[in-house]
Amino acid sequence: MSHSETSPPPRLAGQPIFVVEPQAAHSHTLILLHGLGSNGEKFGRELLDTGVTSSGCKLTKLLPGARFVFPTSKRRRSSAFRRSMLTQWFDIARLPDPSYRNELQLEGLAESAVEILEILAEELKRVPPQNIIIGGLSQGCSMSLAVLLCLEYPIGGYIGMSGYLTYQSDLEIAVAEDDFSDDPFSNDDDTDQEDPSVKAQTFERDLLSLSYLKRATKERTSCLTPVFLGHGSVDEKVPCVLGESAAKVMRDSGYQVDWKCYEGQGHWYKIPDEIDDIVSFITSRVGWKVAVVTPSN
């Protein structure tokens, strides 16, 4: 007698997703990605509990209309940890050197990008793009940077902590090279194709196996999205130089980047300094208003 086998239901994007609903009318959304081996709920609870400003204020109090969305990555075999099954947005062979055997990253990058774009699309049904911030910590920073670069529109802002750019050297070359100077078939309409932000978008969409944009223009990139990148100077897992290099390449790609290095800080966000800087970035660069609260609240 044969036994019919049923396939497990398809995994929903970012599930399980940890969501902290706004304390007031929903006006803004932050989509923040966890690091390797963590999950949405663990990262989200810790960030919103410990991530306080120098005046003792939490992000949920400062942004009462914000919906905080913390997706969870798929479990994948880890080349860096003896093929153990870990939650990771993409595989990586050597943590301090993401360029080593970076072809292992491709499958996860493409799969995770589709999931994050799906989550972003759902949030865009609730609020306009200028009211959305994406970002993350460590590998979550790297994954969300890849998503930012592939977008066809700017969003409110980007916040990255202790991360790096995947395929950074390749992206750097793609942005710097002149594709059209010796092309006999080029014309005046190709000027947008030479813009660094368009080159970065084209490279990233190809890397993530996303559809090619026939009429790519600077206006159809996310380059107007302000970017914050913070990193500890003594980060033992992701060396600070990787974060600083990411900031440079993002600037070369046409983005406005606020770069902060925190002396004596390891692989985590620095409290309260980095939280202060993030709140300042949200108000001064992104343009969102924060609530005036007292520490007792």
Image: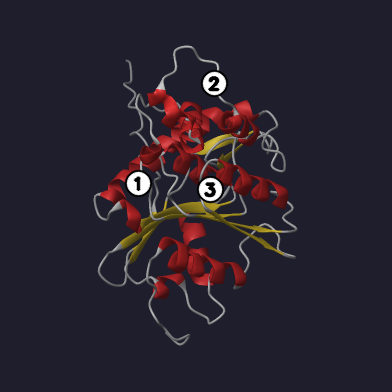
* Quadrant the C terminus occupies: bottom left
Structural distance between the alpha carbons of marks 3 and 2 = 37 Å
Structural distance between the alpha carbons of marks 3 and 1 = 15 Å
In the image, 179 versus 206, the foreground residue is 179
Earlier along the polypeptide chain: callout 2 or callout 1?
1
Identify the residue under disc 1: 120
In the image, 16 versus 100, the foreground residue is 100
In front: label 3 or label 2:
2
Q: Residue at x 57, y 79 (%)?
A: 54
Which of the 4 image quadrants contains residue 83? top right
Identify the residue under disc 2: 181
Structural distance between the alpha carbons of marks 2 and 1 = 37 Å
Q: Where 205 falls versus 224 (above or below)?
A: above
Q: Residues within 10 Å of mark 2 (few under 14, many from 20)?
A: few
Q: Residues within 10 Å of mark 1 (few under 14, many from 20)?
A: some
Q: Position of residue 41 (x, y in %)?
A: 46, 57
Residue 140: image tag: 3
The residue type indicated by label 3 comes to: Gly
Which of the 4 image quadrants contains residue 24? bottom left
Earlier along the polypeptide chain: callout 3 or callout 1?
1
